Each structure stands twice: as C-alpha cells, then as structure tokens.
Image: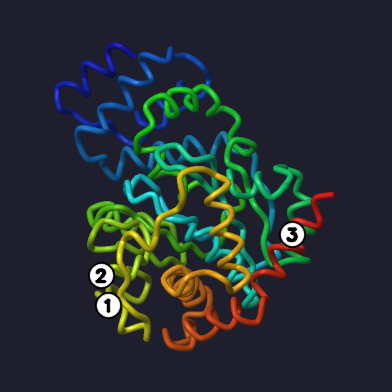
Amino acid sequence: MKEILNYLYDHKTLTKAEAKKVLTNMANGLYNNSQIASFISVYLMRAITVDEISGFRDALLDLCIPVDLGAYNTIDLCGTGGDGKDTFNISTLASFVVAGAGGKVAKHGNYAVSSTCGSSNIFEYFGYSFSNEEQKLQAEIEETGICFLHAPLFNPAMKNVAPVRKELAMKTFFNMLGPMVNPSFPKNQMVGVFSLELARLYSYLYQQWGKNFNIIHGLDGYDEISLTGGFKSISNKGEHLLQPTDLGLSYHQPIELAGGTNVKEAAKIFESVLKNEGTRAQHEVTVANAAFGLRCLYPAKSIPECVAMADESIRNKSAYKSFTSLMEMQS
C-alpha cells in the first residue's frame, strides 16, 4: 500500500485494473485501518476518474453475493448521500410510493454514515429482518412490490472498510459506489447525486453498462429533487433542467425537509408521510422523487402522469399498504 499511496500523492491516477486490485486487497484484509483511511482520503482531495470508479465497482460486484430478481422489471431508487443536507428519508419513502403504484423495487441501502438516519436504520427500526436469502426477497417483492437489500449482507468483504467509514463520518467514494453495486442488478436505476460532476460521471458509466437510468441533481446541492430550487435530470432520453413548477408542485424551504435529530424522529416523519399525514413539503418532495422513479420504469408516461400516479399512491394508502404488508411478513 505504501507504493500505491506515494503514487497517488504524486497526483497520479489508477488504471481500472489497478483500482480493482486495490479494492479487492482492501476487502480481503491486506491493509490496516490507517492505510485504508489514507487511501480514502486521496479522493476527498481530488475527483475520482472513470477508470478508478469502474475498477472499484467491478471489485465489489465480483465479491458480492448476488440475488436473482430477474423475473421482475425492478428499479432501485437511492441517493449517494453525502450532500450534508440531512433531509428526511426521501428515496426510501419514494421506493414505497413506487411499489404502491405498481412498480417492483429492489431497494439497496445501508446504515447512515454522514447523516442521522439511513435506509437500513429506518427498515431496522420498523422491524424489517435483513436477509440475503433469495427466496425471502423474491416472496417480499412478489407480495408487496418491494424488498430491501442491506448492503453489508451482500458484500461481507467490505467489513474491513466499515469501521473506517464510520470513524471518518463523511462522504467518500463509497457513497458514489453504493448505487452502482446493487447485488440484484436491477434493470432500472434512479439515483440522486450531490454534484453535477458526479452526475456526468454516472451518466457516462450507466450508458456504457446499458442501464435504463435517471440521474437527479438538485442545483443547490441536494442528491434528490428537493423542490427548494431547480434540478437537473439526466436519463437515456437526454438532459433536462427543471423547476418544481414544471411538475405542478410548489417551491419549499430547506428547513421543511429536516429529517430529525435521531432515528426515532426520522421514523415518525417517515410513517406520517406514508399515512398521508405529512406536511405539504414532505408530501410533495416524496411525490416528486417517486414520480421520476416511475418515469424511469415507464418512460412512455409523461411527467404529469407520473406525478399523478405517485400522488395517488400516497393518498389512497397503497404506499402505506406496501409498507405494512412488508413489515407483517417479517414475523
């Protein structure tokens, strides 16, 4: 690792093969925590290259425990995190809204690293039983339209990195990798990113991999559609710069998107939105993100149609039914 670090400190970059080898060695426990932290820190000071992130991704996918959900036209909705906004669990809520609207969601996630409450925290709080058993996950998606893939169970080799990430408590290139390494290999992906530079990188890679995708970036730094201002949407159909009014929705203030100071508060917000008891801001932001997930699944539908589908999924309690049914299956 010493040679690798000196090479990187000299402002050089890794090839795809080199990046894959480093992450594989890291996962296999060949480096200590100080070396891992030093390596991660390189990418806090400079942008990651296409070859580097591709190599890291390939290593994780080679090491992962795959799950076959190929019988369904699945979608994963997630954000990279790391935007520092500490919003409520928007992409997780949107996942249930999409499921309530008839979509099939293979939600991939983890515990919070740089925020208060991640998707795994929410699922765990409500009693979801994390599992990598294919039959269980298939039954859940068949019955409720959604299943949850707790990242550490599908990439146990990354246990060596987890303590370092937790201690650093900031966004790293692992935030960027999360949406790329869903072990069920969904055909569709909606991902929110915290920078326009990263949005371009994702767009290039997803096109190379033949993925049906929609990448979202809030121009004021959100890794989701925040409705606090304009946002960029990059998909297989091209790029669009949109405002909340283009969705028939309102502008909202950042304070209205606060996610609470602990998991219990975050869970209270989460459940209230699904019960159609959230604030207008919480409801509309959830609808906006779910709508773009639905549009990724059903590209022939217009934005207004997808907004209406998402809105109805919450109002008629379909999203909440998907949530309660999933949790009832955990007994």
Q: Secondary structure at mark 3?
A: helix
Contact flag, marks 1 and 3 (Cβ < 8 Å): no
Colour scheme = rainbow
Left-right relation of 73 to 284: right
Residue 49 location, x and y as percent? 26, 42
**Disc number placed over residue 326 in the picture, else none:** 3
Q: Position of residue 256 (x, y in %)?
A: 37, 63
Q: Residues within 10 Å of mark 1 (few under 14, many from 20)?
A: some
- The Cα–Cα distance between marks 1 and 3, rounded to whole angstroms, is 34 Å
Q: Of 312 and 104, which appears nearest the observer?
A: 312
Q: Amino acid at mark 3?
A: Leu
Question: Gap between marks 2 and 1, in whole Å?
Answer: 6 Å
State whether residue 42 is above or below residue 300.
above
What is the x, y in percent for residue 240? 27, 75
Q: Quadrant of residue 152?
A: top right
Q: Image point 54% across, 59% down: which residue?
A: 269
- Measured in 3D between alpha carbons, the distance from the residue under mark 2 to the one under mark 3, in whole angstroms, is 34 Å
Q: Is residue 155 left or right of residue 180?
A: right
Question: Badge 3: few (under 14), some or many (20 or more) residues near its Cα, within 10 Å?
Answer: many
Q: In the rendered structure, which amino acid carries the disc numbered 1? A: Gln
Of callouts 2 and 1, the N-terminal one: 2
Residue placed at 46% from the left, 42% from the top?
116
Which element type, helix, strand or loop, lies under badge 2? loop
Q: Which comes sooner in the sequence, label 1 or label 3?
A: 1
Determine crowd level at label 2: few under 14, some 14-19, many 20+ residues with C-alpha closer than 10 A.
Answer: many
**CB under 8 Å between discs 2 and 1:** yes
- Residue highlighted by disc 1: 243
